[in-house]
Amino acid sequence: MASILSAGNGTKKSIKLVLILTSSYFVIQIIAGVKIGSLAVISDAGHMLIDVAGLVMALLAISFTQKPATPTRTYGFYRGEILASLLNSIFLILLSVFILIEGFQRIIHPAPVSGLPMIIVASIGLAINLVGVRVLGRTRVNRKRLQQDYERDYYNKVKEQVAEENLNVHGAYLEVFADSIGSAGVIVAGIIIYISGFYLADPLISIGIVALIIPRTWLLLKKAIHILIEGTPIHLCHEEIKNSILKVRGVTGVFDLHIWTISSGIHALSAHVVIIDNKKSSDILQEINSILEKGYDITHATIQIESYHESGNI
């Protein structure tokens, strides 16, 4: 267990390093974008903010898995990750709307922008992103090796924790990698402006970056709202799970079936299950829990066993 905790701390250190670099550059980029009047730099800062949010959520998710629940907070602070995601999404949508309005205005009335500062600022951002990609990429490889080791000779709970950390690191890795494209786009716009004085490159590139931001932000917003209203996880089918429980020998009905997400990768279920023979309730309950865990990755299940009655097929 000590090696797992050490590995988890190593993952957190890697994410913290990339988070410090990314968030520091985000502040610099916003200030520089406003000062030089480059809409492309400001829009790329918005893109960078998605990375910051992704890294924060990955860090929170890993930290929360190491904190025990308490009587007053039975789920801990897992929902903090989702609330942060919701607020971040709203801010990014507002920023995207501002950039689009300003971008179209600048297409109609082009504003002079200095190309050289754009190139310098975006080049620094690209370098930081590449460092982040390298650090997180190396962490992903290390986590995969660790998971393979423990798949051979350790506990299921440990394997699940390692797998969840892998998903969080992978998500953060993709966010930083995607932002590298935005930084490269700003560099191209800066070069075009510097060489040719074609100022329209700035709003055009900024609109292009927003086109990359909006779909990702919209998906993030939808996911956060879906989790907060306790909707069924999109990758799980309510009817399929119900039918899987009904197929267990001795089960005659399932009702009040609820499936929801506590936080990213942590799903829960509650249901009333009608059986014929109460003497077999323990075996039936064990089989249902096994189906839920192995087939649907639901490890937080509350099953209420009910006596047989004619309306059990509800």
Image: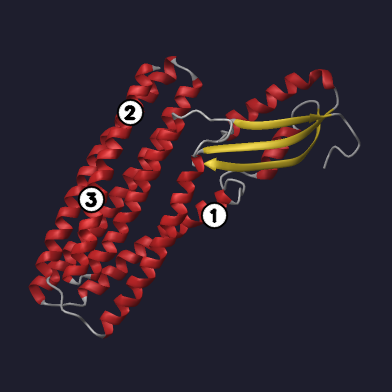
State which quadrant residue 216 falls in: bottom left
Measured in 3D between alpha carbons, the distance from the residue under mark 3 to the one under mark 1, in whole angstroms, is 29 Å
Which structural element holds mark 2?
Answer: helix
In the drawing, does residue 245 fall left or right of residue 229? right
State which quadrant residue 170 falls in: top left
Residue 15: % across, % down: 30, 38
In the drawing, does residue 264 fall left or right of residue 49? right
| Vertical order, 260 against 162 (above or below) | below
State which quadrant residue 172 falls in: top left
The residue most toward the bottom is 108
Residue at mark 3: 24
Residue 224: % across, % down: 51, 52
- Badge number at residue 225: 1
70 and 179: which one is in front?
70
Residue 41: % across, % down: 22, 64
Mark positioned earlier in the residue sequence (2 or 3): 2
Query: Across the whole image, how many numbered discs are drawn on residues?
Result: 3
In the drawing, does residue 162 fall left or right of residue 31? right
Mark positioned earlier in the residue sequence (3 or 1): 3
Q: Amino acid at mark 1?
A: Ile
Residue 269: % across, % down: 65, 37
Residue at mark 2: 9
| Vertical order, 3 against 248 (above or below) | above
Measured in 3D between alpha carbons, the distance from the residue under mark 1 to the one under mark 2, in whole angstroms, is 30 Å
